[in-house]
Each structure stands twice: as structure tokens, then as C-alpha cells.
Image (tube, rainbow, N blue to C red):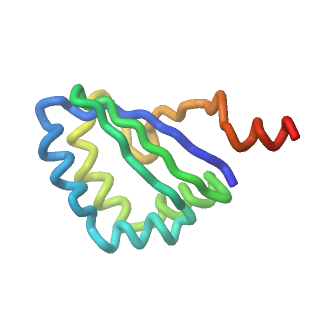
């Protein structure tokens, strides 16, 4: 299993609308995320629009390839792109990935 954390910047003046669009996300998009192999998916956002996303998957490449082929994901990502600052492409394809520097379970397992 791979843990993935990513960062995007929501336009602060569009934050309320962005949040409304996620309450709830389209049911068919939820199904596509699940079918792509992503689990434990969460988004967190600061009042200034800094967004952090997290998910777990068995294969980042296979998950992204699935979503790249999905017409539903393409439609969703096209609608979401307008909410982000300085993007050159689909949000799910160009988000900044953050390296993991600490995981409690991994370190506890290594220590025992």
C-alpha cells in the first residue's frame, strides 16, 4: 500500500463554492474514485484555500491511469480546474505530491 499526500491552492474567493461542490461529490465520481483503487481518501483545506489531499492505494500509476481514462473523472476535473490557482492541466494530474517523512506505524514496526 502506498500513501499519497498532495497539495493544491483553491482560489480564496471561490472557496465557499468549492466546498459546496464537495457536499456531496457526484455519486458517480465517488464510484470512479473507489474503482480506481483509492481508499481512505480525504481532503483538508485552510481558510486561505490551501488544500491537502490524502489517499491510499496499491498502485499510484494504475489508479491514475484508471482516472485518466474515465470520462466521468475528466468531466469532474474540468469543472474543478477553475477553482485552483496556477494550474496547467487537470487538478488530479498536476497536483504537487508531498513526500512522506514520518509514519508512526512504520517506525513502530521497524523498532520492534
Task: Please tell me which residue is depicted at 35% across the width and 59% down the height of the picture.
Answer: 74
For the residue pair 58 and 75, the one nearer the viewer reads as: 58
Residue 98 image position (x, y, % from top left)? 54, 31
Q: Is residue 92 positioned above or below 94 on the image?
A: below
Q: Residue 72's x, y, as percent?
A: 34, 67
Specify the quadrant of the image occupied by residue 70.
Answer: bottom left
Number of marks in the rendered image = 0
Which quarter of the figure has residue 1?
Answer: bottom right
Along the horizontal axis of the image, is 97 left or right of 107? left
- Point out the image quarter for the C terminus: top right
Eyeballing the image, is 55 above or below 6?
Answer: below
- Residue most extreme to the front: 112
On the image, the x and y values in percent for residue 6 come to: 48, 37
Residue at point 57%, 59% (across, down): 63
Residue found at x 52% / y 39% = 5
Would you say 38 lies left or right of 16 here? right
Q: Is residue 8 left or right of residue 98?
A: left
Which residue: 27% across, 36% down?
84
Amino acid at each position: 500500500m502506498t500513501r499519497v499526500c498532495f497539495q493544491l491552492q483553491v482560489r480564496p474567493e471561490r472557496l465557499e463554492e468549492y466546498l459546496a461542490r464537495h457536499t456531496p461529490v457526484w455519486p458517480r465520481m465517488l464510484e470512479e474514485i473507489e474503482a480506481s483503487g483509492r481508499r481512505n481518501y480525504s481532503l483538508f483545506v485552510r481558510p486561505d484555500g490551501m488544500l491537502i489531499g490524502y489517499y491510499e492505494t496499491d498502485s499510484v500509476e494504475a489508479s491514475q491511469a484508471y482516472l485518466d481514462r474515465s470520462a466521468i473523472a475528466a468531466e469532474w476535473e474540468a469543472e474543478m480546474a477553475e477553482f485552483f490557482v496556477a494550474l496547467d492541466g487537470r487538478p488530479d494530474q498536476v497536483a504537487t505530491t508531498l513526500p512522506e517523512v514520518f509514519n508512526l506505524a512504520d517506525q513502530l514496526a521497524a523498532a520492534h
